[in-house]
Amino acid sequence: MAMVEEQPERQGIMGALKKTLYIEEVPSYGNTIFYSLGFLALTCLALLIASGTVMVFFGSGWWLTNHWGIFFRSVHLWAAQAFFLIIILHVLVVFSTSGFKAPRRFIWVLGASTFILAFMEAEFGYGLRGDFSSQYRALQAADFWNGAYLGRFVNALNYAQVYGLHIIDIPLAIFALVFIHYLLVKARGIAKPYRPDFPYTMEKANHVKLFLRGGVFAALIIVLAIVFPSPFLEPASIRSVAEDNSSLIAQTLMQEFARTSDTATYKDSIDPYAYDTRTVYVTVPYEDYIASTNGTDELAVFAAEGSAAQQAAIDQATAYFADGGATNAVTSSDPLIPAVNSLVAMARGGLYGSTVDGENQAIRPTYSLRFLADTGVLDDEASQLHITTDQWGMLREENGMVPPGAWWLAPLGILDHTVLANDVNGDRDGAMILGLLAMLFILFPYIPYLNRLPEKLHIAELIWGSKKG
């Protein structure tokens, strides 16, 4: 008896769910692939959520090295690629058919806002992948946010902050916008032709065809993930640089101590790296070294000297390492030389990087990434891989063009190579231009004359199909 009563209840729940979520009737052109793009974007979003959830559960070591981890990382990458392709096509369809006209303007605003958030979500995701590309792109992103006067609030080098933004904050905002966007689409129905002379009929929505398309599309993404896995290039580390070129580490330490490094002199619109490089990169790590070895505190000897003698010591040590001076000397008339050599030994042993990042747990690994940037090895390797900004590098992966990189950043690349080519404040001005374009994009339906542009192009008929008498 209980089984008999439970069945209608189940049907009632499913029926209510379908009534709430399913669009039952569409115009005669509404069952075409053009009007399945929103659902295909949701399919990509579902794959991103599923693959991302698995990756978060097992951690970065798993998704970088384990066979299944690489597979899920690859699915995540290709789902992101497909998501941007589909959502751009979706925007073009809505634009071409003037599907943003009143009373559907706010639907466009929600969709456009989601699109902008998706850009941010993708770039933060690249910063979390854990390879060399992540390091280099994080540094470029930091320059962008700093140029936009937002560096004090968004630090692309702060792994913990980026992690939270990527898996919690931005996804929640996207889910909320997408949900409201869809409910409004369902309430108002598929957009009708803006031309009153274009006849159409109302048909039952073909949900079977819709789900088949979604299934085929998901299968294609999985196949691409298997055939073209996500690339991985070993990230740079202070230890690897020290093992390869101890002299470079010593030279960089002297720049940090003398406060002449790129980080120490960074002035991109604001000063997000307000810490003292001498303290962070030399004084504190050296104090840890002395505490663990009970050796002579050479920095204390340096501090006891007069200002003229201190500057002479800095100049002498800088010249010594620039000329290829030994990085294992333990004594010298210049106290900075053995002090720096002690830190070089820490770097070769793998202790220096962790010590530096451990100074401020809240912004890990900002310190070590900025130090690596100051050595110049990141720019050199990125140039060899052809992924620097001036090489349109943000548009490709480290291994070439398969899988493609963040090709959706092409507008930024165009700006960098044209309007901003010789602009010393390129990050600031680029952020301002992109911010203005984003606002125009979001508010497009409300801009007189400009919102009539699609009607002048006369391409809606290609999407609606032939007239039906």
Image (cartoon, rainbow, N blue to C red):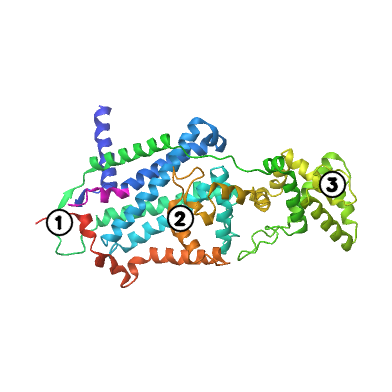
Tell me, for residue 278, which label it has, or none.
none
Q: Is residue 423 above or below residue 179?
A: below
Q: Is residue 52 above or below residue 413?
A: above
Looking at this view, name the residue that lies furthest to the front.
Answer: 323
Dot 2 amino acid type:
Leu
Quadrant for the C terminus, please. bottom left
- Upstream in the sequence, badge 3 or badge 2? 3
Q: Is 34 covered by the magenta stretch?
A: yes
The disc labelled 3 sits on which kind of residue? Answer: Pro
Helix, strand or loop for disc 3: helix
Q: Position of residue 447 (x, y in %)?
A: 34, 70
Q: Residues within 10 Å of mark 2 (few under 14, many from 20)?
A: some
Disc number placed over residue 338 in the picture, else none: 3
Q: Quadrant of the N terminus?
A: top left
Instruction: Provide residue 178's location: percent of width, then percent of height.
Output: 37, 52
**Residue behind mark 2:** 409
Q: Is residue 466 left or right of residue 350?
A: left
The residue lying at 42 percent from left, 46 percent from top is 80
User: In the displayed structure, would residue 341 be above or below residue 119?
Assistant: above
Residue at image mark 1:
200
**Gap between marks 1 and 2, in whole Å?**
38 Å
- Inter-mark Cα distance, 3 to 2: 47 Å
Disc 1 packing (10 Å; few <14; some 14–19; many ≥20): some
Nearer the observer: mark 1 or 2; the answer is 2
Point 90% across, 56% down: residue:
304
Identity, as a three-letter code, of the amino acid under mark 1 = Tyr
Q: Point out the stretch of residues depicted in magenta.
A: 27-38
Residue at (50, 61) in percent of width and height: 416
